[in-house]
Image: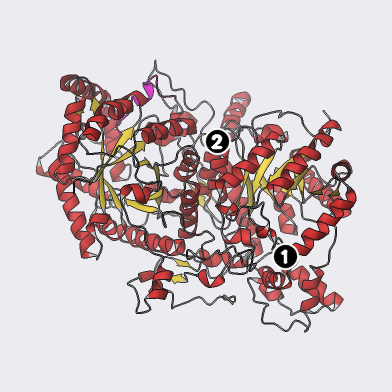
């Protein structure tokens, strides 16, 4: 069975990070980020193109400087539930934080989406980048890195245990004997761990695909370890072809060392393709988009996100970039890396912002054939197993679907028809065996 | 006055709730109905065709093998309602969420998302969790005591209401000419610091077409009624007789008025079971078959629930109702537990007699021919006992008996609507849209009686402030 490419659509509304001008585009409805029909439409188009999944990013802290899309948007699981009953085969992946949810509630909601979609749910596990989120949840400080990652690992373990609460034959619903439930097939988890104590059982049975698929984006050392341990799908960090290849190899190696089957972890690189009838026109378009979004003040303000919502707007632009490492300890690693780079290169605050303002064409810009070539190249040189695609407008999504997907299909790289009606099935991932059934069978065999 | 209409709620149950042990045997009900979204969508559409105000999803998060069949495997309410939202247009969508085991930021966000997805039809049934075993699913050794549960409940709702106001209605000019998407002076942090919660905000979602989700509440204890009087726009209750219903409604309206609220904006919705047949006698016979079929043993087991799933099988059935230690039942459904203890004491009942009495309590006053049932509902409505009714829905053909044979009578008499007045839940319930507190405060700086705004002074300073 030849290795095939996987495609996911990462759906946005009025303009994510860096897309400061997008809301002005007449093709984007003014309230796109909170209009369920805008998302249903995107999912429907992606499904028609046989995409593996429809994916929703998320975060839970904002102030006035945040990108337009983040200011005002729908909660992912609520959104995807509405999309679920307007689709039949495409996976539905929700971002949810393991830091600011309780395992019982989140496991329940994910399992509910899994039932509503008849086996298509996925969970992108995040530990929350914005260190200010803690203040929306009664904590004065964000949990430190080690705690967040330890909590995430245990959270996934608890969720997986809860999802197995009912064995697959727990509900005989036998009218003759009058037995609705076989109580011997209902199991309390009784988890006691460092971060959580959860008795269970979960009040929902397994779906057609057994359990939701676990996704994760892991860049740091802790993140890569977590990904290798628990993730079935991974969102790779951005970077060059070589960086992607190194990341891909590293994750597969770590997984193998943990005794996991490397083919059961799929890596998705993020891509924002720009497709036009000719390469030249596409490059021109790409630069135009860059200029439309290029806004020094917005970039300066949003730079604060990596530093716990620090306010850069009153800083001296031509002074050396301040050492704010202490503000990054609780957030993502991006801030610390930035401080280090600025020191090494002797950059001022202005120069750092401008470094984000230099136009660099992306790798997936060109005519449909050119873009297909690039997607094929990264895939075949093991830089990735699939792409998490982002588009500015529905028109751009349609252009890609109409122009590029058929090329990939012709080349035998991407499916013509869905193999399955579950997310696991289409990703080629196994259905996890119910642990209680496995125990019973093992006990039976060894008795 | 003659324009006052009875409001209708449909409580969507799948395979059978408390006391409905044999409902799952119906050929009309698939074995997995409680987890089948298509089941709920079909029932919601059935209710919408009959111009119901809302569908209602009950909930809990603790089960044992003895839990009612519907509770064993069911969908989480808001996830469920979101899918129903995109297959309906006018009917309200009320989901139960506990304030005891959820964070206000998440609750506010999810309800507001449902409110947007549905075009302004979301409602929140506020509960504090009766089953004391629930605590064990949330890393707690013990359920919160009553005082804490209800203190937390009140503060939780206030925080959600504050978060829902984060954006004023003109926060997003989306003005392409001036290049202004967003007016940052119209985004507000809540900066709430209270006894149970500290939440800075803002919420990352603006108000919906109905302003804020409608607040339902259910709770019979003293603390429950007090909470309802403070926050509830609709109260889900239970009443065996018109007199009980009248007493409760009068009391809740008085309590609300004492808290400075307009009693007209507190709607009382008892839950009711209907059994309808061609004649009264046939209907009563059917009811006897349903209730009587509930085995004594199931009833004995279920008696334990208000007492924290206490095991009553350990006692002699024909001895007087056992003396229970004080802490049993203290943290679960206290009003219900105390009611049972009091009844046993007053009437010198044995344990067996208490169980038999509980079986009888499933008998409904709304049993009979369509005319009888319509008359009784109208009597309760015009007698000031109810503002609405929440009807339990399981078997579709039985629900159809209500919508197709009882409702036309009530419609003809002007008791229920012939068509929807609005596309929002508030609109159809006749409830006002709450003003945005920040807009109100800007107009009247002399101050509003807003408890959350007062807390905002003791601020958590953010390093970022609106420019």
**Residue A85 tag number:** 2
Q: Is residue B80 above or below residue B258?
A: above
Disc 2 residue crowd, few under 14, some 14–19, many 20+, Cα 10 Å: many
Q: Which residues are magenta?
A: B18-30
Name the secondary structure under disc 2. loop
The x, y position of residue A345, in whole percent, is 86, 75
The x, y position of residue A311, in whole percent, is 64, 76
Please tell me whether the stretch drawn in magenta is mainly helix, strand or loop.
loop
**Can you name the residue that lies furthest to the front here?**
B177
The x, y position of residue B267, in whole percent, is 26, 50
Q: Nearer the viewer, residue A341 or A164?
A: A341
Name the secondary structure under disc 1. loop
Q: Is residue A383 above or below residue B15?
A: below
Q: Residue at x 20, y 28 (%)?
A: B367
Q: Is residue B258 left or right of residue A345?
A: left
Chain that bears disc 1: A
Q: Nearer the viewer, residue A418 or B331?
A: A418
Which residue corresponds to mark 1?
A: A333
**Can you name the residue that lies furthest to the left here?**
B347
Chain that bears disc 2: A
Q: Is residue A279 left or right of residue B125?
A: right
- Whether B28 is among the magenta residues is yes
Q: Residue at x 78, y 83 (%)?
A: A318
- Look at the image and tell me whether residue B373 can be seen: yes
């Amino acid at each position: 069975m030849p290795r095939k490419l996987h495609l996911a659509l990462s759906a946005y509304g009025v303009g994510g990070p860096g897309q400061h001008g997008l809301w002005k585009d007449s093709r984007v409805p003014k309230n796109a980020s909170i209009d369920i029909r805008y998302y249903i439409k995107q999912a429907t188009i992606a499904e028609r193109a046989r995409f593996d999944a429809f994916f929703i990013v998320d975060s839970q802290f904002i102030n006035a400087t945040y990108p337009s899309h983040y200011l005002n948007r729908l909660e992912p699981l609520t959104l995807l539930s509405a999309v679920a009953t307007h689709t039949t085969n495409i996976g539905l992946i929700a971002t949810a934080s393991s830091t600011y949810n309780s395992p019982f509630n989140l496991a329940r909601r994910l399992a509910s989406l899994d039932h509503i979609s008849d086996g298509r749910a996925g969970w992108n596990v995040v530990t929350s980048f914005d260190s200010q989120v803690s203040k929306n949840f009664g904590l004065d400080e964000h949990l430190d890195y080690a705690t967040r990652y330890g909590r995430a690992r245990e959270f996934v373990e608890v969720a997986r245990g809860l999802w197995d609460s009912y064995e697959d034959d727990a509900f005989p619903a036998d009218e003759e004997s009058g037995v609705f439930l076989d109580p011997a097939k209902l199991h309390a988890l009784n988890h006691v761990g460092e971060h959580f104590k959860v008795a269970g059982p979960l009040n929902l049975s397994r779906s057609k695909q057994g359990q939701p698929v676990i996704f994760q984006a892991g860049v740091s050392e802790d993140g890569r370890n977590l990904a290798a341990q628990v993730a079935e799908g991974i969102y790779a960090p951005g970077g060059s072809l070589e960086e992607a290849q190194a990341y891909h190899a590293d994750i597969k190696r770590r997984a193998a060392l943990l005794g996991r089957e490397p083919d059961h972890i799929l890596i998705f690189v993020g891509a924002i393709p720009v497709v036009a009838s000719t390469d030249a026109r596409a490059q021109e378009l790409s630069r135009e988009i860059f200029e439309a979004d290029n806004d020094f003040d917005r970039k300066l303000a949003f730079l604060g996100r990596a530093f716990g919502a620090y306010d850069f707007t009153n800083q001296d632009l031509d002074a050396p970039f301040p050492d704010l490492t202490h503000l990054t300890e609780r957030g993502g690693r991006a801030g610390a890396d930035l401080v280090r780079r600025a020191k090494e290169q002797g950059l001022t605050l202005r120069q750092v912002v401008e470094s984000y303002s230099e136009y660099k064409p992306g790798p997936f810009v060109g005519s449909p054939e050119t873009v297909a070539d690039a997607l094929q190249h990264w895939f075949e040189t093991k830089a990735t197993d699939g792409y998490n695609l982002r588009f500015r407008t529905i028109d751009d999504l349609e252009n890609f679907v109409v122009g590029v997907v058929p090329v990939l299909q012709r080349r035998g790289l991407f499916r013509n028809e869905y193999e399955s009606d579950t997310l696991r099935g289409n990703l080629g991932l196994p259905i996890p065996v119910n642990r209680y059934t496995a125990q019973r069978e093992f006990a039976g065999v060894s008795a | 006055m003659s324009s006052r209409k009875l409001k209708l709620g449909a409580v969507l149950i799948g395979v059978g709730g408390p006391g409905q042990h044999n409902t799952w045997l119906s050929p009309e009900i698939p074995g997995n109905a409680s987890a089948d979204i298509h089941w709920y969508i079909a029932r919601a559409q059935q209710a919408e065709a009959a111009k119901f105000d809302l569908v209602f999803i009950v909930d809990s998060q603790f089960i044992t093998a003895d839990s009612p069949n519907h509770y064993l495997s069911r969908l989480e309410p808001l996830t469920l309602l979101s899918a129903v939202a995109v297959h309906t247009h006018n009917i309200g969508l009320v989901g139960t969420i506990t304030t005891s085991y959820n964070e206000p930021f998440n609750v506010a966000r999810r309800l507001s998302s449902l409110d947007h997805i549905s075009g302004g039809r979301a409602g929140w049934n506020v509960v504090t969790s009766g089953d004391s075993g629930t605590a064990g699913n949330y890393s707690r050794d013990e359920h919160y005591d009553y005082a804490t549960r209800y203190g937390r409940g009140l503060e939780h709702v206030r925080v959600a209401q504050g978060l829902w106001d984060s954006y004023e209605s003109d926060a997003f000019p989306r003005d392409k000419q001036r290049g202004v998407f967003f007016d940052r002076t119209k985004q507000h942090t809540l900066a709430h610091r209270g006894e149970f919660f500290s939440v800075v905000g803002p919420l990352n979602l603006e108000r919906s077409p109905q302003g804020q989700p409608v607040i339902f509440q259910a709770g019979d204890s003293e603390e429950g009624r007090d909470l309802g009087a403070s926050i509830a726009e609709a109260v889900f209750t239970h009443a065996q007789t018109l007199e009980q219903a009248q007493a409760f409604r009068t009391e809740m309206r008085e309590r609300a008025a004492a808290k400075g609220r307009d009693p007209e904006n507190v709607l009382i919705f008892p839950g009711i079971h209907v059994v309808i047949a061609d004649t009264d006698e046939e209907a009563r016979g059917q009811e006897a078959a349903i209730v009587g079929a509930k085995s004594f043993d199931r009833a004995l087991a279920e008696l334990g629930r208000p007492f924290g799933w206490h095991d009553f099988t350990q006692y002699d059935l024909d001895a007087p109702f056992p003396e229970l230690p004080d802490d049993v039942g203290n943290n679960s459904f206290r009003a219900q537990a105390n009611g049972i203890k009091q009844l046993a004491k007053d009437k010198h009942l044995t344990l067996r007699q208490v169980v038999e009495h509980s079986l009888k309590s499933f008998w409904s006053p709304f049993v009979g021919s369509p005319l009888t049932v319509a008359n009784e509902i109208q009597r309760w409505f015009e007698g000031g006992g109810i503002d609405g009714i929440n009807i339990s829905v399981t078997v579709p053909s039985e629900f159809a008996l209500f919508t197709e044979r009882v409702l036309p009578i009530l419609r003809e008499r002007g008791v229920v609507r012939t068509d929807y007045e609005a596309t929002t839940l508030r609109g159809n319930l006749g409830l006002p849209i709450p003003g945005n507190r920040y807009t109100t405060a800007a107009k009247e700086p002399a101050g509003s009686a807003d408890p959350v705004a007062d807390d905002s002074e003791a601020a958590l300073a953010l390093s970022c402030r609106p420019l």
